[in-house]
Image: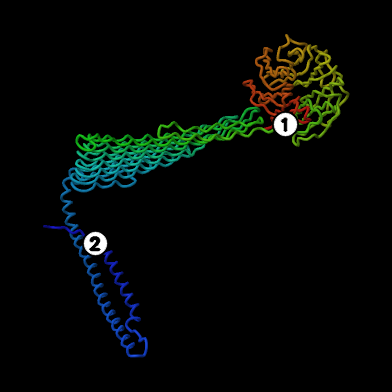
C-alpha cells in the first residue's frame, strides 16, 4: 500500500516562525521570575523561617535549570522545522524541471501540428490588444481568456477547452474615446467535450461621451461559449452590453430673428447583451443572456434667438436630445434534452438578459428674448425614448422663457391725447385740459418744455423738417411749433370747426380733418396757409393718413367708411371703402397697406392700396382708437382705449402676436422707427407708456 504526502513549504516556514516566537516568550517569562524565586528571604530570624526560605530558593533554582533545558530543546525543534522546509523545497525544485521537460516532450507533436498542447491551459490574450485566448489541451486544459480590446476595439475570443476543461472567457471590449462606440465583447470559448462549461462572453465596451454630437453607442456583449459536454456542461453566460455615452453637446442656438434653437443631440444607444451559450449536453442548462447596456443622456437643446421684431416672441429653446435606447438583453442559451436525468423534466433555458434603461432627454434651452413686453416660454425638453430596453428615459426639463420687452411709464402732462415723434426722437404730446403740448427728451424721458397752443389740442404731427402741427379742437385752428425754440411760430391757422386729425405727406403738405365742418383742408408748409378748396368728406371725418404716393386716407366715424383723396385735385376718388364700425385712427405701412382702427367693432381693417379693398379684419382689444406702424419692419400697434392695452399685429400674417398692458384710456400711439420704441398716451392716467426691447 502506498500513500502520498503533500507539503506546502510556505506553511512550514510560517509554523517555524510562530514556534520561535513562543520560545522567546517562555524565556522572557523565566528571566522575569528569577529574582523573586531563586533567592527567597526568611520571614523572621528563627531557624524555621530560615529553613523554609532555603527550601523555596532551591525549588526556584531547579525551575530555572529545567527552563534552560526546555529552551534549548525548543530551539532545536525550530531548527528542525526550518531544515525540513528547506529540504521539501529543494526536493520540489529538483522534481519540477524533469516533469516540465517531460510535459514539453508530450505536448511537442500537437503544438507543432495543431498549435495547441495535448495537456495544459491555453495562453491568455494580451490585455489591450483584442488578442484571442489560446485553446486548452486536447486531453485536458482550460481555454485561455481573450485579451481586452484597445479603445473602441473588440475583445478577443476566449479559447476553447479540449476533452476536459472550461472555455476561456471572452475579452472585454475596449472603452471608446471622443464620442466613439465601445468595442464588442469577445465571445466565450467552448467548454470541454467530456466536461466543462462554456466561457462567459466579454462585456461590451462603454461608449464615450461626446462634446461635439451624439453620445457613442455601447459595445455589444460577447456571446457565451457553447457547452459541448455529452452529459453535463452548461453554456457560458452572455456578456453584458456596454453602457452608452452621453451627449454633452449644447445644440446650436438660433441665429436669425427669433429663430428656434436646434434640437439637442441624442444620447448613445446601450449595447446589446450577449446571447447565452447553448448547451449540447443531455442534462445541462443554457447560459444566461447578458444584460443590455444603459442608453446615454441626450444633449441640451440650443438657445432660441432674440426677437428683433416688435410683437414677435423670442425663438423657442431647442428641444433636448432624445435619450439613447437601452440595449436589448441577450437571449438565453438553449438547454440540454433532460434537466435531472433520463425521463426527467426538460432542462430550462438561460434567462433572457434585461434591456438597459433608456437615457434621459436633454434639457430644453432658454427661449430668446422678445421685444414686445411679454415672455415666450421655452419648449419642453425631449422625453426619453420608448422602452425598447428595460425602461424609458425621463423627459428633459423645459427651457426658461425668454425675457420680454419692458414698459416704462413717463409723465405726459394732464389728459394727454395725441402723440408724435420728431426726426430727432423728441416726443410731442397734446394735453386737452391744459391747452398745451409737452415736449419729452427721448434720452432722459422727461418733459423739457410745455408749450401753450390753442383751445383743446387733440391731433399732432411732425413734418420732415421737424416743424410740429397741432389741431386745436376748441378754437378751430392749427398751431405750428418751431422745434429749435419750442415756441409757436406766427399766427394760428384757421381751419374750420372742430379740427381733429392731422397728417403730413413726404413732401411736407399738411392735411387736417374737421369733424364739425365735414371736410378736409390742405396746408402749404412754405406759407402755413390753407391751399385749395376744402374736400368734402361725409360722416364726421376723423382720422387722416398719407402714403408715399401722396394719396390721403380719411376715416368717417359716422359712416363706417374710408375715403381716398387725390392730392392733385383734392377730390375723393372712387366710392368710400366700407370698413368696421366707428373707424377712428388710421395709418399706412411701409408697403402701402392701410390700417384702420374700428372702435365700434374692436377690429383693425387692412386695405390693399392697389385695389382699395379690405383684405383682412383683425380682431384686437376693446374700442381701438389709434394705430401706428413701425416703418422699418411693418409691425402695427393699436391702442385699445377701453381695456388699457396695445395690440401688436404681424403684417405678414395679419394676426395679433402680443397684447401689452399700458395705462388707462390709451388714445394715442406713435412709433420711433429708428429705435423701435413705441409711445402710448394714457388719457385717464396722465402718463405716457414707452414700450421698448
Where is 294 relative to 548, above or below?
below
Determine which residue is flagged by label 1.
690
Q: Quadrant of residue 81?
A: bottom left
Residue sitting nearer the eye, 686 or 315: 686
> Which residue matches tag 2?
9
Which element is circle 1 on?
A: strand
Please indicate whether residue 543 sits to the left or right of residue 58 in the image. Answer: right
Picture quadrant of residue 254: top right
Q: Secondary structure at mark 2?
A: helix
Q: Residues within 10 Å of mark 2 (few under 14, many from 20)?
A: some
Q: Position of residue 180 (x, y in %)?
A: 41, 39
Mark 1: few, some, or many residues within 10 Å (few <14, many ≥20)? many
Residue extending furthest toward the bottom: 46
Residue 232's place in the image compared with 690, above or below, is: below
Residue 424 in view in this figure:
no
The disc label shown at residue 275, or none: none
| Image spot of residue 270 (x, y percent) | 40, 36
Residue 114 visible in the shown view? yes
Q: Position of residue 285 (x, y in %)?
A: 26, 38
Q: Where does the N terminus fall, quadrant-wise? A: bottom left
Q: Nearer the viewer, residue 664 or 406?
A: 664
Amino acid at each position: 500500500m502506498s500513500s502520498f504526502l503533500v507539503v506546502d513549504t510556505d506553511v512550514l516556514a510560517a509554523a517555524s516562525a510562530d514556534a520561535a516566537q513562543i520560545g522567546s516568550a517562555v524565556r522572557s517569562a523565566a528571566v522575569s521570575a528569577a529574582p523573586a524565586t531563586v533567592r527567597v528571604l526568611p520571614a523572621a530570624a528563627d531557624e524555621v523561617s530560615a529553613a523554609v526560605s532555603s527550601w523555596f530558593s532551591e525549588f526556584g533554582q531547579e525551575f530555572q535549570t529545567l527552563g534552560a533545558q526546555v529552551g534549548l530543546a525548543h530551539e532545536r525543534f525550530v531548527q528542525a522545522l526550518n531544515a525540513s522546509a528547506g529540504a521539501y523545497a529543494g526536493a520540489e525544485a529538483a522534481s519540477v524541471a524533469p516533469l516540465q521537460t517531460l510535459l514539453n516532450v508530450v505536448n511537442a507533436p500537437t503544438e507543432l501540428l495543431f498549435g495547441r498542447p495535448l495537456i495544459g491551459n491555453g495562453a491568455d490574450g494580451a490585455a489591450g490588444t483584442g488578442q484571442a485566448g489560446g485553446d486548452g489541451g486536447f486531453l485536458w486544459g482550460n481555454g485561455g481568456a481573450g485579451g481586452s480590446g484597445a479603445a473602441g476595439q473588440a475583445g478577443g475570443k476566449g479559447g476553447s477547452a479540449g476533452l476536459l476543461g472550461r472555455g476561456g472567457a471572452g475579452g472585454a471590449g475596449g472603452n471608446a474615446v471622443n464620442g466613439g462606440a465601445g468595442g464588442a465583447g469577445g465571445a466565450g470559448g467552448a467548454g470541454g467535450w467530456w466536461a466543462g462549461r462554456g466561457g462567459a462572453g466579454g462585456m461590451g465596451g462603454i461608449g464615450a461621451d461626446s462634446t461635439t454630437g451624439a453620445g457613442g453607442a455601447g459595445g455589444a456583449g460577447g456571446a457565451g461559449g457553447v457547452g459541448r459536454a455529452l452529459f453535463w456542461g452548461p453554456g457560458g453566460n452572455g456578456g453584458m452590453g456596454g453602457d452608452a455615452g452621453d451627449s454633452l453637446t449644447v445644440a446650436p442656438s438660433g441665429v436669425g430673428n427669433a429663430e428656434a434653437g436646434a434640437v439637442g443631440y441624442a444620447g448613445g444607444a446601450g449595447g446589446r447583451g450577449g446571447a447565452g451559450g447553448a448547451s449540447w449536453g443531455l442534462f445541462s442548462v443554457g447560459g444566461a443572456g447578458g444584460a443590455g447596456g444603459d442608453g446615454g443622456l441626450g444633449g441640451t437643446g440650443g438657445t432660441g434667438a432674440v426677437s428683433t421684431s416688435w410683437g414677435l416672441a423670442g425663438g423657442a429653446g431647442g428641444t433636448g436630445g432624445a435619450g439613447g435606447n437601452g440595449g436589448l438583453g441577450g437571449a438565453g442559451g438553449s438547454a440540454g434534452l433532460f434537466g435531472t436525468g433520463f425521463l426527467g423534466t426538460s432542462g430550462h433555458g438561460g434567462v433572457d438578459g434585461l434591456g438597459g434603461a433608456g437615457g434621459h432627454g436633454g434639457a430644453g434651452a432658454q427661449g430668446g428674448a422678445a421685444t414686445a413686453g411679454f415672455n415666450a416660454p421655452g419648449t419642453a425638453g425631449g422625453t426619453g425614448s420608448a422602452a425598447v430596453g428595460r425602461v424609458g428615459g425621463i423627459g428633459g426639463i423645459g427651457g426658461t422663457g425668454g425675457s420680454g420687452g419692458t414698459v416704462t411709464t413717463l409723465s405726459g402732462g394732464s389728459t394727454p391725447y395725441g402723440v408724435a415723434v420728431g426726426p430727432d426722437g423728441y416726443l410731442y404730446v397734446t394735453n386737452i385740459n391744459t391747452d398745451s403740448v409737452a415736449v419729452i427728451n427721448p434720452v432722459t424721458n422727461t418733459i423739457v418744455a410745455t408749450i401753450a397752443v390753442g383751445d383743446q389740442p387733440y391731433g399732432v404731427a411732425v413734418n420732415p423738417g421737424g416743424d410740429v402741427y397741432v389741431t386745436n379742437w376748441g378754437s378751430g385752428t392749427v398751431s405750428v411749433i418751431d422745434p429749435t425754440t419750442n415756441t409757436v411760430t406766427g399766427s394760428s391757422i384757421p381751419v374750420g370747426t372742430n379740427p381733429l386729425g392731422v397728417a403730413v405727406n413726404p413732401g411736407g403738405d399738411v392735411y387736417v380733418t374737421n369733424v364739425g365742418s365735414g371736410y378736409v383742408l390742405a396746408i402749404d408748409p412754405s406759407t402755413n396757409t390753407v391751399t385749395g378748396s376744402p374736400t368734402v368728406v361725409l360722416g364726421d371725418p376723423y382720422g387722416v393718413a398719407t402714403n408715399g404716393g401722396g394719396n390721403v386716407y380719411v376715416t368717417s366715424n359716422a359712416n363706417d367708411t374710408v375715403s381716398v383723396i387725390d392730392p392733385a385735385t383734392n377730390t375723393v376718388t372712387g366710392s368710400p371703402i366700407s370698413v368696421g364700425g366707428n373707424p377712428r385712427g388710421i395709418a399706412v405701412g411701409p408697403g402701402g397697406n392701410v390700417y384702420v382702427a374700428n372702435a365700434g367693432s374692436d377690429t383693425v381693417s387692412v386695405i390693399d392700396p392697389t385695389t382699395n379693398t379690405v383684405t383682412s379684419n383683425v380682431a384686437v382689444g376693446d374700442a381701438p382708437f389709434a394705430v401706428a406702424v413701425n416703418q422699418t419692419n411693418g409691425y402695427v400697434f393699436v391702442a385699445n382705449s377701453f381695456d388699457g392695452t396695445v395690440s401688436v399685429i404681424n403684417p405678414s400674417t395679419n394676426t395679433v402676436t402680443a397684447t401689452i398692458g399700458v395705462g388707462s384710456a390709451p388714445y394715442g400711439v406713435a412709433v420711433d422707427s429708428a429705435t423701435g420704441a413705441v409711445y402710448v398716451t394714457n388719457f385717464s392716467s396722465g402718463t405716457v407708456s414707452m414700450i421698448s426691447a
